[in-house]
Amino acid sequence: MLIQGKLLSGQDDLVEVYHIRRKVLIDEVKLPEQEVFDEFDNKAIHVLVYEGMEKEKAVATGRIMIDGTRCCMGLIAVLKEARGKEYGDFAVRMLLAKAFQAGIKTVYLKTKKEKNKFFQRFGFRDLEEDSSSILEMVLREEW
């Protein structure tokens, strides 16, 4: 199965992004709506991952918000029926590549402790120890 990704700005049509977030983060994870849809969407860079050659179905999403030489990654979500196929991995890699291209030196991410291993394989490390976790990744220029 072919995987395709697309980067979007906050001014683009985010209907597919919002659909995935609602299904995963609100309906499944039970996050409050105000944490899933916020005022940062119009300033963020979003990724959509599609399954299929013709971008038939959006299956994963995420975003980064850039602030100078650092950024915050978040709202990574993969539809339940599409998990285990590396779509989340692809979304994170696209966002990290965009951050690197933008000259970002540090990427922050807040996640649940049980998701740390997934993000640590990209080079993120723990900054805090509690039920949620702030992770940091330093992007090095030699990449």
Image: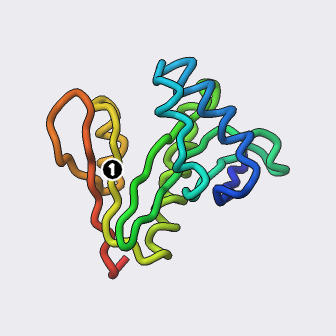
Spot occupied by residue 128 in the image (x, y as percentages of width and height)? 16, 42
- Amino acid on which the number 1 mark rests in the picture: Arg
59 and 34: which is toward the camera: 34
12 and 106: which is toward the camera: 12
Spot occupied by residue 120 in the image (x, y as percentages of width and height)? 29, 48
Q: Residue furthest front?
A: 39
The residue to which callout 1 is attached is 121
Relative to 96, residue 100 above or below: below
Q: Is residue 61 left or right of residue 143?
A: right
Q: Residue furthest left?
A: 129
Residue under the point 29% across and 59% down: 137
Residue under the point 25% across and 38% down: 133
Residue under the point 36% across and 73% down: 69
* Screen quadrant of the C terminus: bottom left
Q: Is residue 67 left or right of residue 11?
A: left
Q: Quadrant of residue 68?
A: bottom left
Label 1: few (<14), some or many (≥20) within 10 Å? few
Residue under the point 33% across and 50% down: 121
* Screen quadrant of the N terminus: top right
Relative to 70, residue 89 above or below: above
The colour scheme used to paint the residues is rainbow
Secondary structure at numbered mark 1: loop
Spot occupied by residue 3 in the image (x, y as percentages of width and height)? 68, 50
88 and 134: which is toward the camera: 134
Spot occupied by residue 12 in the image (x, y as percentages of width and height)? 73, 56
Q: Is residue 134 left or right of residue 7?
A: left
Q: Quadrant of residue 8?
A: bottom right
